[in-house]
Image (cartoon, rainbow, N blue to C red):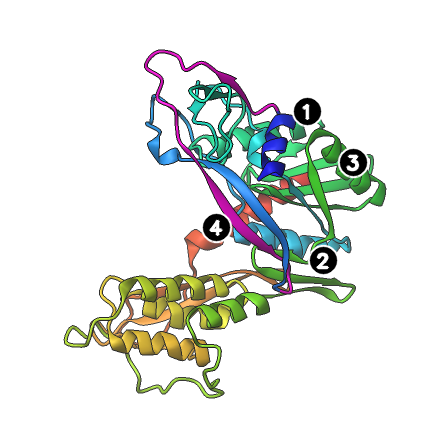
Amino acid sequence: MLEELENFERNHVWDLVEPPPNCRPIGTKWVFKKKQGKDGMVVRNKARLVAQGFCQKEGIDYEETFAPVARLEAIRILLAFAASKGFKLQQMDVKSAFLNGFIEEEVYERQPPGFESARFPDRVYKLRKALYGLKQAPRAWYGRLKSFLLKSGFVMGSVDKTLFLLSHGGDTLIVQIYVDDIIFGGSSHALVSSFAEQMSREFEMSLMGELHFFLGLLIKQCPEGTFVHQAKYTRDILKKFEMGDSKPMTTPTSTNTALDADKDGEAVDQKEFRGMIGSLLYLTATRPDIQFAVCLCARYQASPRTSHRQAVKRIFRGFSDADHAGCRIDRKSTSGTCQLLGTSLVSSSSRKQASVTGWRGVDNALIKGEIESQWTGLIALLV
């Protein structure tokens, strides 16, 4: 906690002032978190002071809040591109990233619980920079980082606003931003090292070296290619839903098994069911073979029954990725597509089809178009 407050002082986040008339200071609270490494071991205990942003009112305490975030497909495209060009991606983390963002509005905060000033207990803090929890904090940080990169000679992607490219002679440097995590790599080691030093001078950074663990993805960069899996994430969700000791199934689900609304079935906990679906949907980032089965069960999140929960638990143990007029209600089929960049899978999709005469392939134009746009944007930057 002391380290967090010292970080506030170094970054000149706030000033202790007398509260102005009609001042409505926002409350603060401490949040404690154990940060884990790729092996699941605790590497750091963190204490963070956050603002109670739910007290803010739009038009009074903040205006714009939107800040772009890289899509998972964009990360996979970058991994595929780096593998094809033969350079390894590096990773860095910005310490207390939001504290680097300047805010334009007048925002007052109450003193941190447990650290109130003995001399001025009635004073409040006037913020100079964004604080975690504020509605405008992500946008303020993104604006600060974008401005710095553009001044440093980078060009921002026309489609993906979190992608930046720097050309120097015949070498290129690519930077992808995901809030406070930054992935970067290039064709020149000197250019990569120079960027890392430049960022460290401007911001307080943690240089993490070669990219190994990012957004729950375990990444191994080898001369043969880049391998991505979610072994740790899989173990975590099995433990979370008490499925770790379940017997794995090596055979697919019976083709006679079909789900419907099952209105007469026993209702189950909706919150738990939705949590299971959401966890499995993120797992499809590296397991597209379960996408159909997960999306099928996701149709019944509004009113889940015992049969639906059993089907989801079956996916945790094993799965079926085939369907032919499988919907009992309208006899529709479900099919899907995979979008590839060269030989690398970057996205997959599942869609329910109106065909009742049989299975037919799907060209998911929307998702495919977004992937092609991101890839085209990267190519345009390189050109």
> Amino acid under label 4?
Gly
Image: 216 above or below 378: below
Question: Toward which corner of the image does residue 157 lie, by quadrant?
Answer: top right
Query: Residue 369: which disc?
Result: 4
How far separated are the C-alphas under marks 1 and 2?
Answer: 29 Å
Q: Which sits in the foreground, 131 or 186?
A: 131
> Amino acid under label 1?
Lys
Single out the mark in the foreground, 2 or 4.
2
What residue did someone put label 1 on? 151
What residue did someone put label 2 on? 83
Name the side, left or right, on which 110 lies relative to 87: left
Quarter of the image where the N terminus is located: top right
Q: Position of residue 95 (x, y in %)?
A: 63, 39
Of callouts 3 and 1, which one flags the residue occurring earlier in the amino acid sequence? 1
Image: 3 above or below 307: above
- From where the camera sits, is residue 372 visible? yes
Single out the mark in the foreground, 4 or 3.
3
Q: Residue at x 76, y 67 (%)?
A: 224
Q: Residue at x 31, y 74 (%)?
A: 309
Q: Which residues are magenta?
A: 12-39
Question: Toward which corner of the image does residue 79 lie, by quadrant?
Answer: bottom right
Crowd class of label 1 (few under 14; some 14 to 19; many from 20; radius 10 Å): few
Q: Residue at x 42, y 58 (%)?
A: 364
Crowd class of label 3 (few under 14; some 14 to 19; many from 20; radius 10 Å): few
> Amino acid under label 3?
Glu
What residue did someone put label 3 on? 197
> Amino acid under label 2?
Ala
